[in-house]
Image (spheres, helix red, strand yellow):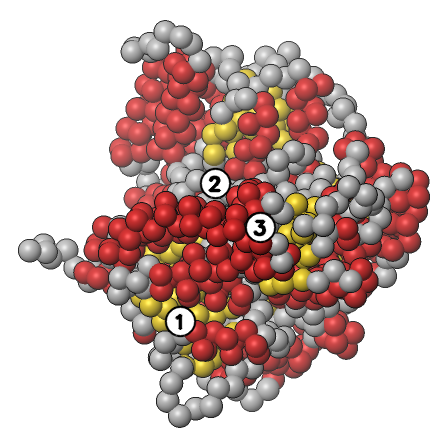
Amino acid sequence: MSSQPRPSKSPRPNWVSTRNPCKACAPLGAALVMRGIEGALPFLHGSQGCATYMRRYLISHFREPMDIATSGFSEATTIFGGEKNLRQGLDNVTSQYHPALIGIATTCLTETIGEDMHGMLHQYRALPGEADDPLLVHVSTPAYSGTHIDGFNDAVRAVVEQLAEAGHAPSAYLENFVNVFPGLVSSEDLRFLKEVCADFALPATLFPDYSETLDGPSMEIYKKIPEGGTSLAALRATPSAKASIELGRTLRQKRTAASFLQERFSVPAKRIGLPIGINECDIFFSAMEKLSGHKTPEKYTRERGRLVDAYVDGHKYLFGKRALVIGDEDMVVGLTSFLAETGVLPVLCASGGKSGALARSIAEVTTHLREPAIVRENVDFMTIAEELELKDLKPDFVIGSSKAAKLARTLGVPLIRVGFPIHDRIGGQRILHLGYRGAQQLFDLVVNTLLEVKQDSNSIGYSYL
Amino acid sequence: MADILRERERQVYRKGGEQPFQLDCEKQSAAGSVSQRACVFCGSRVVLYPIADALHIVHGPIGCASYTWDIRGALSSGPELHRLSFSTDLQEMDVVQGGEKKLYAGLCELIDAHQPKAAFVYATCIVGVIGDDVEAVCKRVSLEKGIPVLPVHSEGFKGTKKDGYRAACDALLKLVGTGSTESVTPHSINILGDFNLAGETWMIRDYYKRMGVEVVSCITGDGRVDEIRRAHGAALNVVQCSGSMTHLAKQLEEKYGTPFIRVSYFGVEDMSKSLYDVARHFKDKEMMARTQAMVREELERLMPQLADYKRALTGKRAAIYVGGAFKAFSLVAALRHLGMTTVMVGSQTGNKDDYEQLRELCDEGTIIADDSNPLELSSFLEEKDVDVFIGGVKERPIAYKLGIGFCDHNHERKEALAGFEGMLNFAREVYSSVMSPVWRLTPRRRGSSLEVVK
């Protein structure tokens, strides 16, 4: 059987409007990245509302303070240009937060009126200042092209581009470290990646790193900028790494930080999928073995062993169950790979992103499927609902972001909340998706969710299942 | 002590001492101040959101629609079109070539698919810049589809959230007066500025019903297009959330001669006073008698239950930061009713009169702040050693990070806090946060060490 996705048409591909979106806008992803730099403050050049809405969206997921400053455009600013507001905003943020870096992202408004960010920031930097004035980095994030994921990836690249210094290596790293660009994953996932690198004795610059800034401890005194994040020294040293690993099969070659470092500084780039499930984790851990020169520590091989054992214990509950997978593209690819290897049938894999690489990536990780999944990118929730109905796909469960809650409720099937955002439960930032351990938690969750349905939906009320 | 931006020094006031009361307000937020405010679009979206049988389409790139999808707790007793998110999702080519065609096509397909009673088209920042003639597209679709299609001029940069309220009121004004008022009775009102969060409008409607008052429309809660069209037939407009709806009430007074009164449904005193004010307006002795009997009945049920909460909460300190100052008045009173002191109070959009009234209402030493931000708010919470902070989702992590209780009194709340029953819910909510044992474990109360507490 062909492993290519089934060629099929959407029920009505000509919807002009977007109905219940499966994406957010680009500056949001950029703001999240800036939160993953030590001592940094995200700043949006545009209207007041953008910053407030994005703060609210991110706070509802992470349940952590998330300050995003803005130049707060008025009508006059829009007509005459935003330089004065930008300067005042940067001055105020500097005096209030004393940041080490201000990460400036544009919005659709400032992109459309054609603000010359480069020139304005150049002028601003040239003004007389203090020795500890913050570094300024800028990423262009027009909301009308791409999603929050594009904003995220573009910001990672922009920060690396603007801070990278050849020949600059923090002494502790020497010449034996790697850059790890994980993409949009949970705070717990980031902690996991750091743990793995430490266990392989492989020094690593993980960027962005909001593992602490967006999942920090209770405080006695409010911290203006939460502790943690990738250090500026590490970001300056990225060209001295012996390699870069970037996670995500749908990343577009030209636009990533790793490809920049490869082209400009000849740092070899290794792109692999998000390590979700055994197959993708095996690729990840063998890459770690090659880069570190060490065998995978027993801790992880034992986790892998337990996971395989669990797959066996639970296989009957999952085989042939039909899943709708929704979310950010690389999360969808990872989840699909994991589900497919456990015997679940991913019937529809969908995302609001439009990398152009989703179908190919899904095909790569589901070669053994007898019935290839339908793959849709650049779709919204109402289109997904229509496709499910038209093709009579009848999923047994939905797995993805909490934005799918309405759809799952209509379908009358459980939603397993993973990825981003999760707005109707606590702990989204603490979900571990990555590694054998993450797959173990996902596996138990999926099996138990289906067992719960089975137990609750009959009149017997089995005590053993 | 708070490190307050120079531009904002006159927007923070401490009651007492020598300084004369002067509080700057109704200003554009200072750039870089990390204001808790949103934008013009937000103001419009808030007011119109609860109209449940209308189509709401956001004209612009996807963000504005994404961030406001099903964001508020405004319930509907029937259609739920307002809980869906529609956007023209403008792309790069649309920005270059203009978005009118896309808006036209989007509106037509959505009206055909959902058969709404009216449609609201929200113009976002970029639409104001690329120069789409939203008005013309709306007119054309309205003619073709036979329903009102109303542009809402809510470009984010064109002012503050308050200007968004105004734009929404202007759109509503085009609807009011287009329906028949034939069967409307003399003792009739419109409810303005109650958003039916967690079903609050239903509770309020029930009070009015028991008083013998007909509610012609509740424009902003469980709203229906046909009801709004005949709203000019009501004898009185009863305005809560005056920051957002006073403009509409004034316009209705000017255009149709309908008088209006300001009310608040939060807290025992304000709730009772609101109902009495309405009864007094109609100069109907029987109605007043019914109102008195109802209030008495409600209070008899409520007071003994509140007393228990008051015993536990007396002496606790509260901070308040809300959107409109009018709500803050009621909250100060409601907290006082529970034996609590308000040590800090602020709002995003209060005006001079509002803050003057707050100053009169509050105790010595209370901090009053206009258009505050996370750094100020966190320092106020620390300085005043607050037990519970009352605000919205954006304020929540400030309190929680410092190990301080929090009560959501914003549009996302799932508990009804208005009315007599709402006062009990409010007391319960404050109690269950303030009295939680988790605070004892936080560094603020116990330090960070693992030392065993004897």
Q: How busy is the neighbourhood of tag 3: few (under 14 within 10 Å), some, or many (20 plus)?
A: many
The residue located at (48%, 52%) in the rendering is: B292
> According to the image, label 2 marks what residue?
A424
Disc number placed over residue A428 in the picture, else none: none
Secondary structure at badge 2 equals loop
Q: Residue at x 40, y 74 (%)?
A: B362
A17 in relation to A96, above or below: above
Where does the image place residue A183, in percent across and percent down from the top left? 52, 47
Res. B287 mark: 3
Task: Check disc 3 and give the amino acid type.
Answer: Met
Residues A145 and B62: in front is: B62
Above or below, A442 against B183 in this view is: above
In which quadrant is the N terminus of chain A drawn? top right
Tell me whether circle 3 and circle 1 mark residues in contact (CB < 8 Å): no
Q: CA distance from mark 3 to mark 1?
A: 39 Å
- Can residue A110 be seen? no
Depth-wise, is mark 3 or mark 2 nearer the camera? 3
Taking the view exactly as shown, the residue that stands out farthest to the front is B285
Above or below for A316 versus B262: above
Quarter of the image where one finds residue A360: top right
Amino acid type at circle 2 is Asp
Q: Chain of mark 1?
A: B
Identify the amino acid type marked 1. Answer: Met
Q: Residue at x 44, y 70 (%)?
A: B345
Q: Secondary structure at mark 1?
A: strand
In the rendering, which numbered label is found on residue B344? 1
